[in-house]
Image (tube, grey):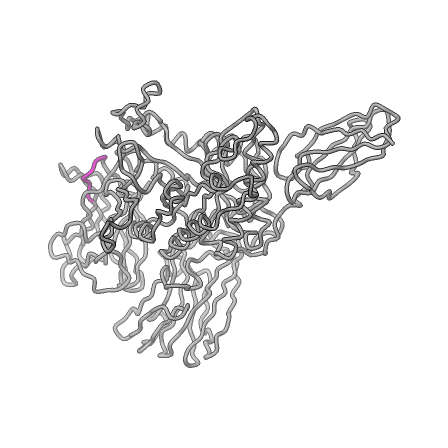
Amino acid sequence: MYIKKLQLIILFCVGGSVAAHSSSVVSISNNVDRMEVYWSSLVNQTYEVLVSTNLVEGFTISNQVQATPPENDWFSNIQGDSVFYQVRESVLTNIPSISPTFSNLLSNSAMESDISEWNFNASTNEAQASASWSNGELFIDITNGGTQQQYVFVRQVGLFLENGRTYTLTFDIRSDTSRTGSMFIQNQADYTLKYVETNGISIGIESSTLNYTFTMNDPSDSDALIHFGLGADEGDVWLDNIVLSLHVSDGNPGDMRVVARERNRRLHRGNNFMAAKAVLGHGRLEDYELLNEHHFSHCRIGYKLDEVVSLSDGYIVPASDMQNLRNMVDWCKQMGLIAVVDPVHNWMADDSADTFASANDSAAWEADLQKLSNIWMQVATEFATDSVDQVYFEIVNEPRDNSENNQDVAELTQTGLGAIRGISGNETRTVIICGDGFSTRQALIDEFDNNRIPLDDPYLIGTFHYYDPFTFTKQGANDVAAGRIPGNTWGTTNEFLEVETDFDAVMSANMSWAARNNTQPLPIYMGEFGVDNEADNHHSDRKKWLSWIRMQAEKRDFSWAHWNMYQNTPASKGMGPWSGQYYTSNLNQKLPRSFDADPVEALVGRYEFEDGSRGGNVQYTNEYAGFSGTGYAHYPTNLGWGVFAQIDDIFIPKDDTYKIKIFYASDQERVLRVVSRESNNGTQAGLIAQQIFPSTGGNSSWNFLEIDMPFNAGESNTLRVIALEDQGVQLDWIHVTQ
């Protein structure tokens, strides 16, 4: 028996389309008893083989051929003068098993260590109650519930509800006596706009799990809240496991991408802990305390597991390195931050730790893929039981293009995804993927343009790194030939516009990819951006660049992480001083790490009212609960006209209109005047003569109000909130973005 073996040269296009993998071969010998067709295959992907004798008509010979990477084989005994074979991915067969609802839209649902993210209020003098954490539950101790259920309440704000979508709310509740309560899901600004209203909830002594399903028939709302009314009774209440899940279309990954979009929104702002420091075990809990203190929401934790494993021992991660990584993730979680685990931070075109024969040796590439797979199977196993809302994965950092080796980042992505999804507990974990060639903006665009983004995995976020222009951001390198010399400036009109053009190009490529493939756009994460501290030796343009990049990302719903947390030497992009030795020779004396004020201001754009100035008799107090910082602005009850609270020294990168988010509380609707001006010369940039501040339900119940205000470029801008005929509201802080 004679067997002819033919290799298909396959056009690789991930996603399960009917022409994803295709090529043709011709049998030219009648004495061939059997034809063997083999092709490069992907983990968990199934295939079908088609045959044709005329290249016009084809039919399925074998379906659901299970992949056994790196190659897959299929045999045929079909004979003829000309037989053409085609291989393609079986459509949508490699979708992870997914529940018809996705994990929680709410933050801190399980109350594992505290009750953060949940606002409590006893809104009138007749109601007396307090809230605290108790053994993994939210405990409301009610001394006097008042006469109405809304007089004592617990709520969470900032929810996104999409028109036409169906949601299910579940929660556990109990009391020390039989009683009733209420639950609303409603708009923050207009409390008459209720999407769910349930009164007379029966609360018993034994804990019970309650379920409510509803369809969002109103227009989409990005500023909704969930409210539990617990007044009108003195029975204490315990709440736990509050989950708001979105129903999705079974088998439609694009429809389910809303999950990743919501998780990306929660990432919001972050910073990078350098892999070079992590490998040395230099991380400490205090690093994450700093991030929390300065209002960051996540940390991208780098590590070089690709450099600490070796071929000789099967790429086993040393226990000490896995423990280092575990410690940093746990510290991150302890401080209420999301951890982005980036364990393959120094991936090269070939293996830098175990150098193979040559860069274009296919065996080296296959060994590298095995190395990547082994690393991720171990990491995925280590964090399999960690909440998918708290720990995200990033497959590889800044892969290098190597055309000789036929390296394709899509293969890295599929290899990493296969390893991660194959470990139980990671089926729905968020995974961050990049483009080839150092994860640049253009690299991600190329992935979109070439349809190399997996369509069948709804839990993906795309990432890019942004350091343009290099002559400015990397000027500390002193590379004269590349123009990276100290003293380069940034901030012309065209340079501001170039950033917007660059970011819009990412959005355009993303939208085009989604339209071509009948899916939803991929959520975007700008995982690195920064400027060498050398820039500060000559001008303040570094601060201007950081602020503008951050704002343009937020404007387009990109989450982001600054590079990096520490080392503010001239040739570093760190935002604060670093001490590798945590303790001095006197073991009781810590060497503190800290963040510099200027980059934090540019990156966060958050200002506390108690750090500003006052006019008339406005007071700074901490009388009511729920505020941040050390206090808030409080207007006297017997004075109106002209009394103001003011934020001073607001940094603005360019003349423009900005979105100001004001965090405030008020027991009733009030009308105030809002003014922006440049402090140095008093020039008024904008004025809102009558701004309505809706009631938040009480002076200890804090909510957001967003307004658009023009500002002039500079370091000394002010925002003033002025009382009219009535007293003002309680003013806590503002956030400035575009």
Task: Locate residue 579: give its quadrant.
Answer: top left
Q: Residue furthest top?
A: 481
Q: Give the quarter of the figure containing the C terminus.
A: top left
Residue 301 placed where, x, y %? 41, 45
Q: How would you classify the magenta stretch by its main secondary structure?
A: strand
Q: Is 294 situated above or below 208?
A: above
Residue at the (20%, 47%) spot, across then down: 647
Q: Is residue 25 above or below residue 668?
A: above
Residue drawn 35% across the image and 26% down it: 470
> Residue 725, percent across and down?
17, 57
Question: Dividing the picture into quarters, in which one does residue 712 lie?
Answer: top left
Left or right of 367, for residue 475:
left
Q: Give the mark count.
A: 0
Q: Is residue 303 visible?
A: yes
Above or below residue 565? Residue 21 is above
User: In terms of depth relative to the viewer, which is nearer, 492 or 391?
Assistant: 391
**714 in magenta:** yes
**Picture quadrant of residue 55:** top right
Q: Residue furthest bottom?
A: 177
Q: Of 244 and 343, which appears nearest the observer?
A: 343
Q: Horizontal placement of 457 versus 114: left or right?
A: right
* Closest to the observer, 20 or 732: 20
Residue 580, horizontal then vertical, whole percent: 30, 44
Q: Position of residue 310 (x, y in %)?
A: 52, 40
Q: Which residues are magenta?
A: 713-718
Q: Is residue 81 magenta?
A: no
Can the viewer see residue 445?
no
Instruction: Locate the N terminus and report the quarter of the image it occupies.
Output: top right
